[in-house]
Amino acid sequence: MVSPLRGRALLLAVIIALWLVPTVYASPRTTDARLVYISNAYYTDLDGDSCPDDIKILVEFAFGELDPSRVAINLWIILPSGVTYTFKITVYRPPDCSTLQIDCMNMAYESGWYTIDMSARLSGTVDGRYVVTDTFAFDPPTGGGPGLPTVNAYF
C-alpha cells in the first residue's frame, strides 16, 4: 500500500513530467504586423469612368532578413451594409521594402465606414511560415458608378 505522502509525491512528479513535455504546433506563427501591413486605403477614380467609386489599397512589404519565397494575401473589403468582397493575391519572390498597389474598381458605392481586413501567409522563410494580420478603415463618399467589381495588383 502506498502512503499518502508518497502518493502525493508521485502525483506531483507526474504533473511536472507532463508539464515538461515539449509541445509541437502545426500552425504557422503569428508575427510582427510590420512585416506586411496596409499602409493606406482610399477611394478615387481609377478606371476613368468619372466616378470616384474605386478603392486603392497600399500594402507595404518590409521583410528584412526574413526573405520569404511566397506571400499569400487574403483581403476582405467590408462595406457599411455588410456586403463583403473577398480576394486572394499571391506574390512569388516578393521584393523587400516595396509597396504592393491593389486597385479595386467599382467597390466604393455606399456611404459609411469601409473596413479592409488582411491575412498574409509568408512561406519559404528560413524559420518556417508566418501569418500576419492587419485591419484598415476609411470613409468614402456616397454614390457609385457603372461597372462590375474588379481587382488589379502590381508593384
Image (tube, rainbow, N blue to C red):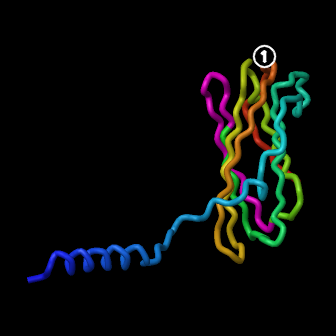
Q: Position of residue 141 (x, y in %)?
A: 81, 19
What residue do we see at 73% from left, 66% from top? 70
Q: Is residue 71 left or right of residue 95?
A: left
As rendered, which of 31 and 143 lies closer to the eye? 31
Specify the quadrant of the image occupied by residue 121.
bottom right
Q: Amino acid at mark 1?
A: Thr
The residue labelled by disc 1 is 142
As rendered, which of 8 and 121 lies closer to the eye? 8
What residue do we see at 70% from left, 53% from top? 73
Q: Secondary structure at mark 1?
A: loop
Specify the quadrant of the image occupied by residue 87.
top right
Vertical arrangement, residue 45 with respect to residue 142, above or below: below
Q: How many marks do you count on the picture?
A: 1
What residue do we see at 85% from left, 47% from top? 101
The reply to whether the magenta stretch includes residue 17 is no
Q: Position of residue 20 (x, y in %)?
A: 43, 77
Specify the quadrant of the image occupied by residue 32.
bottom right
How many other residues sit within 10 Å of disc 1, few (<14), some (14-19) or many (≥20)?
few
What residue do we see at 87% from left, 22% from top? 51
Which quadrant of the rendered structure holds the N terminus? bottom left
The reply to whether the magenta stretch includes residue 80 is yes
For the magenta stretch, what is the residue range? 77-93
Q: Position of residue 34 (x, y in %)?
A: 78, 55
Which quadrant of the rendered structure holds the C terminus? bottom right
SS assignment for the magenta stretch, majority = strand
Q: Is residue 57 left or right of residue 117?
A: right
